[in-house]
Each structure stands twice: as C-alpha cells, then as structure tokens.
Image (cartoon, helix red, strand yellow):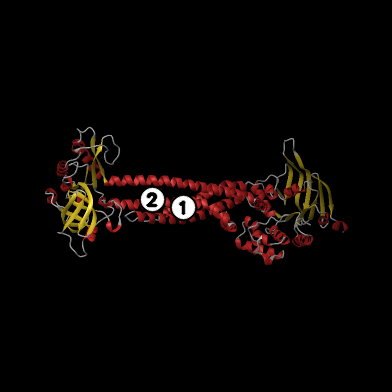
Amino acid sequence: MGGEIIRMTGIVKNYFIGTPNELHILKGINLTVREGEFLSIVGASGSGKSTLMNMIGVLDRPTSGTYVLDGVPVSDMSDNAMSDVRNRKIGFVFQTFNLIPRSNALKNVELPMLYAGVDSRTRTRRAAELLEMVGMGDRMRHRPNELSGGQKQRVAIARALANDPPILLADEPTGALDSATGRMVMDLFHRVHRKDGKTVVLITHNPALAAETDRIVTLRDGEIVADVPGPGKAAV
Amino acid sequence: MFLKENILLAIDGLRSNKMRSFLTMLGIIIGIGAVIAIVSIGDALTASLNSTLSRLGTSNIYVYVSARDSDSSFGPSGKMDDADLISEEQIQTFAAKYAGEIGAVSYSETGENGKAQDGHRSANITVEGTNAGYGPVNNVKLTRGRFLNDRDVRDSRRVAVVSDRLVSNLFRAGEDPVGREIDVDTDSGAESYTVVGVYKYDPISVQGMEADKGKDTRTSLYVPVGLVKATAENQNYMQFVLSTKGVQDTQAFTDKVQRYFERLYAANGTYTCKTQSMESAITEWNQQLSVVSTAIAAIAAIALLVGGIGVMNIMLVSVTERTREIGTRKALGARSGYIRTQFIVEAVIICMIGGVLGVVLGLLLAWGGVSLMERQMPVPVPLVVSAPVILGSVGFSMLIGVFFGYYPARKASRLNPIDALRYE
C-alpha cells in the first residue's frame, strides 16, 4: 500500500450559517486514506455521508478544516481549479448513473478526456478500450436509453476511469440495480481495485456491500463513530 | 474552446427534438424572412422606379402654377382664370431668353375621350392637344412619319399623331396609315384628322398612365393644341415642361427658372410659379421609398426581437431540463466556461439555422411579391438578391443567438454541481 491519498483534518460543514436554523452536518471529520485502499463509508440517511462524499469528491468546500488530496490542498480552491482536480483525480460513479442522455456510450466515456484536452483520436481509442474492459465493447454506439441498468453502470465505471484518476468515488453504485447486476458491478470494482491499484471509496447504507471492503468507516450525526477493518481483512 | 465538439453536440440536440427546435427557430425564421422580403422588394421597387423615371427624361424641369400658401407640389386648388395661368407667349419669351439652355418646351391641353372610327372598326382615344415640343420633351417614340411641327400648331391644322395600338386596331396589317384620314367621335361631335405620324405606345410615359386594358387600350391622339383650346375653359396653361441641353447644374438652372417666373407672378397675391427638376423628383422618391422600407424593416426587426426572446425562453427551459446533465458535466471536470460555451453555441446554432431558413423564406416571399407587382405594373420589377443583406441577416441572427443565449448559458454555468446532481 502506498502513501496518503486523502488527508482530511477537522472538516466541518455547516449550512444556513448565522441563522437560527444553522445546521451542523459534519462536525470535525478526520480521515486519512492510503493509496490503494478499498474503503466504505456507511451510515443512515442524515448521517452526513452524502456531504462527506461531496467533500471527498471536491464538489464542495468545507466550512472549516483542511483537505489535502494527493498532496495538494484543495479546500480553498476556486471553482475552476476544483473542476480540474475532479477531472484528473476523481472518477465518479453515481447511483443513478448520470450518463448524458443524448450521447452514446463512447461519447460518454470520452467526456472527461474532452475536458482534459485529450485529442479526439486518443479519446476515441481509449474510450473504446475502457468499454471493452467493462464488457460493453459491442454496445459502444448505443445511447443510454438503449441500455439496461447494469450496462449503464458499466459505461459509467468506464467513464470514471477515463482519465486514469487515482480515486474512484462510488455513491450507492448498486442502489438502482437488482442483486445479480449489483454483484457484477461490485466485481468490477474489486477488479479495478486489485488490478489497477485504484483507491476505491464506496458510499453505501448496505452493510453487506461494506463487508466486502478493506475498511469500514461509520458515520453518525456528522461524526465518525467507527473506523474498522472489513470482516475479510479482520480475519486475515 | 472545444468548438467542434460543442457544435456537434448542439446539432445532435436539435435533431433529437426536431419539433421543438423548429418552433424555437420559427420566430427567427419569420423575423429574418420579413426583413429579407421587405428589403428585397424595396430594392426591386427602387430599381424599377428609377429606370421608369429616367425614361421620362432626367433632364426635364417642370414649371407649374401653385397657390402661394400651398406646400403641395401638385396642382393648386380653387378657381383660376387665365390671369393666374401661364400664357403661351410667356412660355415662348422665356424659351427665347434661355435658348442656350433649353432644348424644347412642351405644353398641352387634354381634350375629350372618344373613338376613332373607320366604318366597322374603332379604337379608344383621348384627344391631347400639344405643341411641337411635346414629342421630344416627353420622349415620344415615332415609328412612322413625324410628330406635329410648329406650322401644324401655329395654323391649328387638322393633323394627328396616332399610337401603334390605334393603327393595329383601325388599319389592316401592312397598310400605311400616314396620310390617311381618320374620323374621331367625341361627345361634342365628329372631327376628321389626317395622320402625319405613328408613335410607339409606352405604358409608362405620362400620356398613358391609364392601366393597360389589352387590345382596346385608350391611347392619346396628339393634335395641335389650338384645336383643343378652342373649346377649353382657359386659354393659358397651368404647367409646362422643358428639356434642358448642356446644363451641368440642373438644380441651379431650376432655381433660375423659378426666379424668372416668380418675377412674372410678383403682382399675383394668390398664385406663384414653382419648379421641380426630374432629377430632384427621383431623389425625393427614393428618399420616401427608403423611409418607408426602413420603417417596415424596423417593424420586422421587432419580430426578430420576439424571436430572440423565444430562443432565450427555450434555452432557459433547456437549462432547467438539463440541470442533472450540467451537474454531471461539472462533476466530470467541465469548467464553467465550457458549460457557458456549450449553451451559447447551441443558441447560436439554432439562430443560424433559423436565419438561413429565414433567408430562404424571405427570398421566396420577395420573389412572390415582385411577381405579383409585375403583373400589376406596366414595367418590369427586377428582383435584386443582395449578398450583403443575406450575409448580414445570417450574421445578425447569430448575434441574436449570442445575445439571447448568454443569460441562459451563464445561468447554466453558475449551477452548483451538488445541487445540479441532486436535481430531480
């Protein structure tokens, strides 16, 4: 296992700051993730795990605290700088897939590379390779509405890997899938984790899925209440 | 920034929702179509009018009696007697004084309508009493014989110059009408004239403004003016026309003519003489026409504005509809500028396609309008397709896209990715 890829220190996130309704969503999160870890963040709804995911994914800025991602402090960046960091460092996989409806699978996978300024030929070649890798090589020209849920999620995973980011951030990736396709998607994460050595952060409320990971971080009321190795690891 | 991808994306989007795209464009299509149609028809009318007016003689100057308090360039109102009118003698004295500048003077008196008869055949005519200068000044084109000469006029001889229409109605093909006698019936009786010349009927010239009624068109029968004046109320003239020769500055000469006649009318408290050169009349006409077409084009521009607002409206709807897409793009690393460009390009493409379709529509309308006018008017109306106007219209519609696309695009680019991703 490599060095630190995520270091969060005293991350606080409040909403409606200064009003009587001020909400304290994250109450001082300290979280360090090492490169190549497969980590799950679990918690009931309202525990703050979505907000924490937005922080890890550099979609949001903390009210206070610092976040160093792959050696770079990102907590005070401009919007455009945050876009660039997301583009290079994070591969997002969403519960609802979030493919661009009017673009086919290939174009969807090309998108992060387009924003990274990769030339058209390289984009297409790499997108095709990634789609082959996730078993979607024969459906590259299909639009999202012509794909099943499991197929959409595989395209989304290929898209998340497009710029070869060090971190894969998955938010309930099997939440909208039946158990068989959910299994297939989880296998894909395991494969990416083992083969490419990616750091995978899985946000879920499903204890069974969390049990498959190396480390389980439990969130309650905006605080980390447990941080334990996964059952598989514990047994080792 | 990523222009090619954005253009392809926009076209993809338009194709996936053809009906809505078309309705969005409709405002631009109608606006640009209206502008193109109006400008093209206006240009065609101007060109047609100019060629028509110049055929009437651009070097001519009109001298006419007008009430002192009247602004109108058309005839005076109220009763006038010979003392208020210009006498033949005054015209001749004036013509003699400026013999170096004046080619010819023309004055005339319109007589009665009637029929030229020849046993069982007839032709509609208007008796027009003229002097000898009438022919050259008004560009009467002779096909046979001659126009009335000074002796015909001085002696009021019973001679006539007839139109080729009359000839074809009254004479057999190949017959020479010159030297023949024709009988003319009017309300006041029958007269006979010897034909001395035949002129080519020109529907645009002053002598035949009455609409062309096919074979039986009423044409002017030119006779010495004295014959018509014999039964006329006034012996003097309300107006006359002169053609200039070798005059460099028509306006200066026109002013000189006006001053000459103003002096003659100095003692007349009610009436005076005014002048207008054909040149200034053409300029005036063109100005009026361009004012009218500018005004109509401005109204058409309002249609364009409404079209632009329609585009903005649909773009705002589109931004709302695609909130999740925008959130996804931002999560994947799109900077705000990219999102903004994407939506502006989309608006510009909509407007550009609308503009091109509008140009096609406008040209079709202009072509239809011009064909219709050509049927009504005795002269050709050439459709002028002006490249700058077309390119300008398409360019302007693209500017509309930028202008009305900017606000929705900025709105899209400022969406917070978290809110956008959560948007249902």
Mark 1 Cα shell of 10 Å, populated few (<14), some (14-19), many (≥20): many
Both marks 1 and 2 on one chain: yes
B401 with respect to B189 (left or right) = right
Task: Inspect the image, locate mark 2, and give the three-letter code of the amino acid beneath it.
Answer: Gly
Asked whether the residues under the numbered discs 1 and 2 touch, taking CB atoms below 8 Å apart as contact, a structural biologist would say no
Q: Position of residue A67 (x, y in %)?
A: 73, 47
Chain name for mark 2:
B
- SS assignment at label 1: helix
Expressed as whole percent of the image width and height from the top left, the position of residue A186 reads 78, 60
Q: Nearer the viewer, residue A218 or A174?
A: A174
Identified by mark 1, the residue type is Gly
Q: Is residue A142 above or below residue B415?
A: below
Q: Which residue is mark 2?
A: B42
User: Element at badge 2?
Assistant: helix
Find residue B33 and name its label.
1
Which residue in the rendered view is the most extreme toward the right?
A235
